[in-house]
């Protein structure tokens, strides 16, 4: 749903601004990035913003479930995000108001990733990026 994507983008912009990061947002939605983030040192990051609202339950596993983020691009043929065009995936889990700041090279060629912000004991691959806003300060 396009309105959810806009909500996630605006939420990211507000959070980034509150952390003293500079946000540049292009007009239109045809570019591979949703925004550029610049830190006080002048370093620029190309950011793709994605989000999800509800947890999915895996019928083969019991437990707390997971939040799935589609990391693919393209309207008809889904492809992994091109690391030459995007530096960071900012993934938002709306239900728990959690951000993941994930370097795009950490995603490999996956078209979807699983996130577990509701499980503090999770050792899943991308959990180390939970609320890693300092990434933009490096």
Image: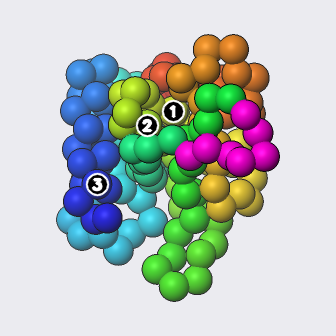
Location of mark 1 (residue): 100
Comparing 119 with 81, the one in front is 119
Residue shown at the point (40%, 27%) measured from the top left: 96
Tell me where residue 23 sits by quadrant.
top left
- The percent coordinates of residue 37 (x first, y second) are 37, 40
Residue 52 disc label = none
Tell me where residue 3 sits by quadrant.
bottom left
- Depth check, mark 2 against mark 1: the one in front is 2
Disc 1 and disc 3: Cα gap in Å? 17 Å
Residue shown at the point (31%, 56%) measured from the top left: 5
- The percent coordinates of residue 68 (x first, y second) are 57, 48
Q: Is residue 127 above or below residue 78?
A: above
Rate crowding at label 2 as few (under 14), some (14 to 19) or many (20 or more) other CA atoms within 10 Å: many
Residue at disc 2, secondary structure: strand
- Depth check, mark 1 against mark 3: the one in front is 3
Q: Is residue 98 above or below residue 47?
A: above
- Tell me the quadrant of the picture where the N terminus can be found: bottom left
Location of mark 2 (residue): 93
- Identify the image's colour scheme: rainbow, by chain, secondary structure or one colour: rainbow
Comparing 59 with 75, the one in front is 59
**In magenta stretch: residue 137:** no
Residue 4 disc label = 3
Tell me where residue 129 sits by quadrant.
top right
Residue at disc 1, secondary structure: strand
From the viewer's perspective, is 6 left or right of 108? left
Which residues fall within the magenta stretch? 56-62
| Mark 1 or 3, nearer chain start | 3
By secondary structure, the bulk of the magenta-drawn segment is best described as loop
| Mark 2 or 3, nearer chain start | 3
Residue 109 seen in render: yes
Comparing 10 with 52, the one in front is 52
From the viewer's perspective, is 72 left or right of 52? right
């Amino acid at each position: 749903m396009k309105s959810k994507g806009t909500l996630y983008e605006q939420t990211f912009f507000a959070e980034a601004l509150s952390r003293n990061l500079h946000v540049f947002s292009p007009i239109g939605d045809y570019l591979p990035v949703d925004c550029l983030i610049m830190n006080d040192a002048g370093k620029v990051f190309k950011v793709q913003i994605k989000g999800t609202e509800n947890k999915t339950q895996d019928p083969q596993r019991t437990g707390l479930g997971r939040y799935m983020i589609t990391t693919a691009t393209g309207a008809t043929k889904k492809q992994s995000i091109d690391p030459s065009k995007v530096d960071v995936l900012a993934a938002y889990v709306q239900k728990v108001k959690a951000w993941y700041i994930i370097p795009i090279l950490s995603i490999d060629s996956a078209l979807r990733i699983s996130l577990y912000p509701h499980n503090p004991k999770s050792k899943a691959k991308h959990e180390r990026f939970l609320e890693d806003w300092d990434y933009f300060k490096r």
